[in-house]
Image (tube, rainbow, N blue to C red):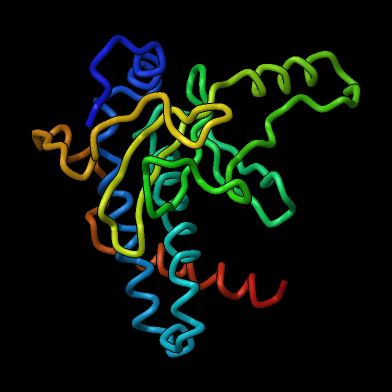
């Protein structure tokens, strides 16, 4: 269900990530899930009971990889950066819109925010003074960006929502339709924009294998 009453948060979501760009997201996520599934099939170590638990991590990493590819290819008009989690458990992709910051989460119930351990809440201004005024202004500008989420899940891809999470409550202020179910017209121009097919590519598979090797060495 989509909010129907006038909602400033809904306006913000629609302005920051307009429908013209949203059709790219389901295909990117389908590729991510397909890549993770292909790697699980190809790697005997991932077919054990313990190995199957890594599927979620593979999907999450593949999803960030595919979304970042869209930005690098100029198909999504955002900037990106890799930022540390609130807790020292690695890095996550951030897409910077004009007034927001979008992060990606795999979750079982899209109506809820990611659990506290995963929720990206590390954007507050630091108390330290920076050497240059420009650095302080850049940090302040980033900290003022409103948070947006791309939620997908779960072990099988059954939904894909863009949301504006509530700052303190475990719910959202605004959300898109399930983008997996939103039809779009595939004109020749748009077909070029959509980039790779939904099938996994060798480069994406190698990216996941490299992530596994890096984790084994941590």
| Above or below, 51 relative to 205 | below
176 or 17: nearer the viewer: 176
Q: Point out residue 93 in the picture as x, y percentages from the top left corner.
A: 55, 44
What is the count of numbered marks?
0
Give the residue at the far front of this rendering: 169
134 vs 14, nearest the viewer: 14
Where is residue 94 shown, x and y percent of the image?
Answer: 55, 38
The answer to whether 146 appears left or right of 164 in the picture is: right
Of the pair 16 and 202, the residue shown nearer to us: 16
Quarter of the C terminus within the rendering: bottom right
Q: Position of residue 98 (x, y in %)?
A: 49, 18
Q: Residue at x 27, y 22 (%)?
A: 3
For the point 58% across and 43% down, the residue is: 119
Provide residue 35's location: percent of width, then percent of height. 35, 66
Quadrant including the N terminus? top left
Residue at point 90%, 26% (across, down): 128
């Amino acid at each position: 269900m989509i909010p129907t009453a006038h909602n400033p948060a809904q306006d913000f979501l629609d302005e920051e990530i307009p429908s013209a760009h949203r059709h790219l997201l389901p295909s990117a996520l389908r590729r991510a899930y397909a890549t993770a599934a292909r790697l699980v099939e190809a790697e005997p170590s991932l077919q054990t009971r313990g190995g199957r638990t890594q599927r979620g991590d593979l999907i999450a990493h593949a999803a960030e990889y595919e979304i970042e590819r869209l930005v690098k290819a100029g198909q999504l008009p955002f900037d990106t950066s890799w930022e540390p989690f609130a807790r020292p458990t690695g890095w996550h992709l951030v897409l910077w819109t004009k007034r927001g910051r979008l992060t990606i989460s795999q979750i079982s119930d899209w109506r809820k925010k990611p659990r506290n351990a995963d929720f990206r809440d590390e954007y507050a201004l630091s108390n330290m003074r920076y050497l240059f005024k420009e650095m302080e202004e850049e940090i302040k500008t980033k900290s003022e960006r409103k948070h947006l989420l791309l939620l997908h899940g779960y072990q099988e891809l059954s939904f894909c929502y863009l949301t504006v999470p509530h700052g303190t409550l475990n719910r959202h202020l605004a959300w898109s339709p399930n983008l997996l179910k939103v039809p779009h017209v595939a004109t020749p121009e748009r077909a070029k924009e959509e980039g790779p097919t939904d099938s996994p590519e060798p480069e994406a598979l190698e990216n996941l294998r490299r992530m596994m090797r890096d984790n084994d060495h941590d």
